[in-house]
Image (spheres, helix red, strand yellow):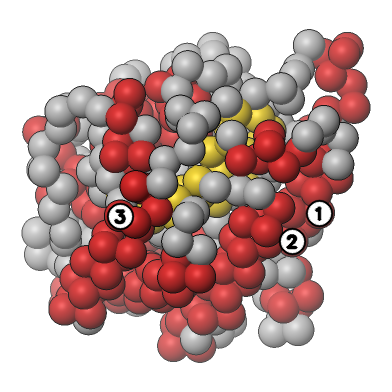
Amino acid sequence: MAVAHAIIYILLTSLAAAAASSKSTFGCYESIISFGDSMADTGNLLRLGSANNLPDSGNPPYGRTFFHHPTGRYSDGRLIVDFIAESLGLPMVQPYIGGADAAVNGRSFDKGVNLAVAGATALDVSFFEERGIKNTCTNVSLGTQMYWFKQFLATVPEGRKFLQRSLVLMGEIGGNDYNYPLMQGIISPRVIQSFGPTIVADIGSTIQELIELGAETILVPGNFPIGCIPYYLTQFKKSSTKKDYNSTTGCLNWLNNLSIYYNELLQKELTRIQKLHPHVHIIYADYYNVMMRFYLSPTQFGFTEDILRACCGGGGPYNYNDLVKCGKPGASCCNDPSIFTNWDGLHYTEAAYRLIAQDLLRGHYTIPPFNDICPSIATSSPSAQIYKY
């Protein structure tokens, strides 16, 4: 698997280099279009709910670090999309839901729109319902977000040019397609892994549709090392033995292998699409390996040695308790989120997101290097490394 991953990595780099040579005359980007789930949601799920039934992200201590109040972001502060916008000199990308009230609430979509919804899947909800899998968070899928986007684009003067001048962030999306069956434990891991080609094909078809609409730069993240997050480490603690864990990181190998497999499928699909559209910049963002650095050398990046614990949670070895979640009564929060990578057992802290965004923008852990496409972002950074555990 490691050899295949390396071959794909090299192939994607060579294919995308041709696209980078035909750089847009618009310079970098005038706006950001964001699709995805809770890793990119800046408030859509919060607006889809009601005041009487807020998602966890609508309660303190969410948002405490930067905004000093909950915004609907599943973090203590900003997300990767926020840091990318900041680095490109653009305002934070506003959530799409409630956009009709923009004149009232002061929101503007002139510089982009965020369609990401926490809990969203790549595949339609019917795919999971047919298999007895429930999404208790939302019925929004990538198809829903694409429908919203086309409605939005139809209202934009010269919509094709607007999209050509935009940076499109395709996710992260697809992680929840694995999360829900894993969390509910009703389907074997092998069957869950078999969903991968269908998930990736759906993401690929959405990317091609965006290209047909005019998109010229699309950043597509892979999945994180899910075997390192407190939720799964807690859920599978009783059923795991010593051999299931990586001796260096303490992460669950089989779950990380699931992420690696999915990421390889995604890169193959991006390679295929890049061949069809050599003029388009299709950039793979290697979320897996950029995060693995933290688990291998936490103190090097300013994090606590107890890297697998969540900052906010209900106790236990990983500070995660499904009955006492962050944002609910009884949960406690660490004093300094900046020394933690994980915020609430499933999502990351602003400190982690900041470092991830910095490396992506510097061209490390992106194929092709992002700063080759947008040179004004270029800055120094340690060399990227590929981890296989």
Residue type highlighted by circle 3: Ala
The residue wearing badge 2 is 143
Report the side of 104 relative to 144 (left or right): right
Residue 247: tell me if it is visible: yes
- Tell me if label 2 and label 3 are in contact, CB under 8 Å: no
Q: Secondary structure at mark 2?
A: helix
- Tell me if label 1 and label 2 are in contact, CB under 8 Å: yes
Residue 320: tell me if it is visible: no
326 to 211, vertically: above or below: above
Distance from the alpha carbon under mark 1 to that under mark 2:
6 Å
Quadrant of the rendered image containing residue 98: top right
Q: Residues within 10 Å of mark 1 (few under 14, many from 20)?
A: few
Identify the residue at image location x=34%, y=56%.
18
The residue wearing badge 1 is 147
Residue type highlighted by circle 2: Gly
The residue wearing badge 3 is 17
Rendered location of residue 22, percent (x, y): 41, 46
Identify the residue at image location x=30%, y=55%.
17
Report the side of 57 relative to 236 (left or right): right
Q: Secondary structure at mark 1?
A: helix
